[in-house]
Each structure stands twice: as structure tokens, then as C-alpha cells.
Image: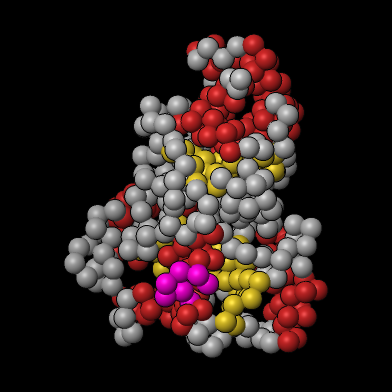
Amino acid sequence: MSVALLCERFAIAGALREAALRAEIRCAQFGYPSQAAVKTAMLAAFLDEGMSESDLAGSTGYGYDDAARARYESLLARVFGAERALARLSIVSGTHAIVAALAACVPPPGLLLSVTGAPYDTLRSAICEAPHALTQHGVRYREIALAGGAIDLPAVLRALDDETPSVLFVQRSRGYAPRPAIAIAECARVFAAVRARAPQTVIAVDNCYGELVEEREPTHVGADLVMGSLIKNLGGSIAPAGGYVAGRADLIERIAARLYAPGLGSALGPSLGFGRALVQGLFIAPLVVEQTLRGLDFIAALFEELGYPVDPAPGTRRTDIVQAIRLGSAERLLRFARGLQAAMPLNARFRPEPGAVPGYADPVVMSSGAFVAGATIELSCDAPLRSPYEVYVQGGIFAEHAYLGALFAARALTAET
């Protein structure tokens, strides 16, 4: 569906329509994102796995010998080039997966070193500030700020000379911060240098929003662990819940022992009949990510045409599925979120209002009408009400939905008086 047809169908006219048409032309000139290599790798993973329909049958209760769970985790390990994967419905979020992994791999008084600055708000709270945070149980924590939007490798190496951390942590995506995402090529460079200087340090990567965006994953270039959510990229908009960790087999078993119980480890955990949704979601995930990237490129081009700073810029090679738009005021954040909400397949008539969110110091306004609650592979936005007043747009199952959401959000902004 062309932008012109969307504008006609939904009464988008005037200067906004002209800006949208210019944005569409720019996107066509850049070339549309293609996940051909990622799609091919996914096909190979499924064919190498050799699943049968009977493997999709799930279990209840303890979940011993759950074929769907075992096959799904094996598929994820193939996708990540990892020894093992642990993917469970009982891991309720990316933050849950990350904190479980860090707690298992940083025995007190070990050092957790974040080399991408402060993690996103809820994770930093879980590490440092919340009741029962990791630091309250004896884990020591340090941060090294990014330098010019990149990992400050000289500072990292100096820190390794001072002390060998138990875990070196990388947050791949921008989160809700005015910083770029970290590309796999940069991960490869940093991981090689860290491995040479501190071979015993576990390299752990928050992979949320980054899965299947590039041809390689962090575990292909030296990460020991990746962690994330199953209702973002990997879920393909079908997975109903869950989180994952993937990487070295010994670390996965250590994390499983913490999540469940020592001696039980990864041997239990029912899929509750959702194996089909998890596996099918993974199979179509590269296509959904491709559509998301295409939609985000249009959003970036449109809002740049309207005079707003955007990051990444349209046509830029992306490393996650988050688009930042600097709107400059709390009022514009609210207008944007309410405009985007009006394009949602569910709850389109809701009116987003800012409110307190656990783990965030500032009020946050969100827009979402997802079929799976909280699934940010579906079109959504989040905006903490704080300077520099950026909104972060994620997802979009098909590009035209992202186009429409952008048009509605822009119309809400241009209605300012």
C-alpha cells in the first residue's frame, strides 16, 4: 500500500501529506531493508533441526521431557550459534532474563562492569537501587560511559588492568537514552580485546531489540551469553510470553539452577501447549523484523522532513528496532503518543497519559495496542517525560501499519496551536 493511498483513505492532506510523499521517495532511494541472509539462516536452522509436527506437543505440571521446549531451545541455540539456550514462559521479561543471568554469573563480591554506560532504568534499578538489588547482596558494580556513542575501549582495558570483573556487560540497544545502538562489528572488536586481556571474564550482552537485525548475533563474535525477551524480535508477534538466555552450556546450566533449583536446573518447565506459537513465531521473525525496519525508516524520514532530529537517520544501517525522535517538550511527547495510539488495532480510542512505571524515576507515557501485551515487536512507543524529551518508537508487524502510525502521530503534532 502506498503512502498516497494511506493519506487518501485516512484524510491526511496538506503539508503533512507532501512531507509523507517526500519521505516515501527518500526511502525508495535508500533501498528497502532486506533480511535475506537472516531469513536464509533461519531456514537452515529449521532444516538442520528436523522437527516433526509431534514435537510441538507440550506438557503441563513439571514439564519433564517437554519436546516442544527442547526443540525450541535447540532452534534458538542454532540461531545464535550457541552451545545451549534456555527459553521459558516463566522468564517473564528481558529484564528478568538479564538479572537472572547476572546474579548467577557474578558471585559476591564479584565485579559487574557495564561498558555501555548506565543500563536502561529498570535494569539499573534492579542492579543498584531497588529492594534486594544485586549490590545489596554483595555484588560490586561499575560503569564506563560511552565515548562518542561507542564503547570506550581504552577505558575498558584500563579497568581490566585494575581488576578482572566477573562479568563484562553490554547493552546493545539504546534503551530510553539518547545514544546509538551498538553494532555487531563493534562488539567483535571489543570482545576480542577483552578476551585477550581477561579470558576468564564472562561477556554478557543484553540483546533486546537487536535479535535478527544484523546477520550475526553477539554470540557469533565472542559473547558468552545473550539475554532477551521472546515477545520482541524473536517472537514474530506470535509468542505469547517468555524470555531467553543463550550461550555457553556451563553458564546456561548455572542460570537454570538459579531460576529453578540446584539439581533440577533446566530439566523442567512446561510449555503449556504454547510450543507451536513459539516455534512458528521464531520461523516468521526475520520477515517481521524486515517489515519493522522498513517502517522505522519511513518514520525517520517523515519526522526529519517535519524538522525533528531523529536517530538513526533514514537510510542508516540499523542494529536494533528502536527509532528515537527528539520532540523537545513534554506536550509534544503526549501529542505523539496519543496520535500513534489512534492507529492501533486494539485500544485505538484510548488516550495515553503519563504515569509512574516501576523502575523508572520519571513519569512515562506509552502507546500500545498489541495483541500480546507488552510485545514491542508490535508497533508501540515509550517516552520518559524528561529532557531531551525523546520518544522511542519500536516495532511494527507490517510496514504500512508503521506508516499509518507515523502519519497519525505527525498529524497530532501539527495540530498544535
In the image, 27 versus 98, the foreground residue is 98
State left or right for residue 145 relative to residue 273.
right
Q: Looking at the picture, does residue 261 appear above or below residue 131? A: below
The quarter of the picture where residue 192 lies is bottom right
Instruction: Examine the rendering and report whether any part of residue 400 can be seen.
Output: no
Residue pictured at 19% horizontal, 67% vertical: 61
Query: Residue 33 location, x and y as percent?
Result: 64, 39
State left or right for residue 222 relative to residue 270.
right
Q: Looking at the picture, does residue 313 appear above or below residue 11? A: below
Per the rendered image, the range of residues in magenta is: 128-134
Residue pictured at 58% horizontal, 54% vertical: 175
Query: Residue 363 location, x and y as percent?
Result: 50, 48
Query: Residue 206 location, x and y as percent?
Result: 55, 63
Query: Residue 300 location, x and y as percent?
Result: 66, 35
Q: Looking at the picture, does residue 210 appear above or below residue 91? A: above
Task: Check if residue 273 falls in the magenta segment.
Answer: no
Residue pictured at 47% horizontal, 59% vertical: 359
The quarter of the picture where residue 292 lies is top right
Q: Quadrant of the N terminus?
A: top right
Q: Quadrant of the C terminus?
A: top right
The quarter of the picture where residue 87 lies is bottom left
In the image, 370 versus 391, the foreground residue is 391
In the image, 362 versus 186, the foreground residue is 362
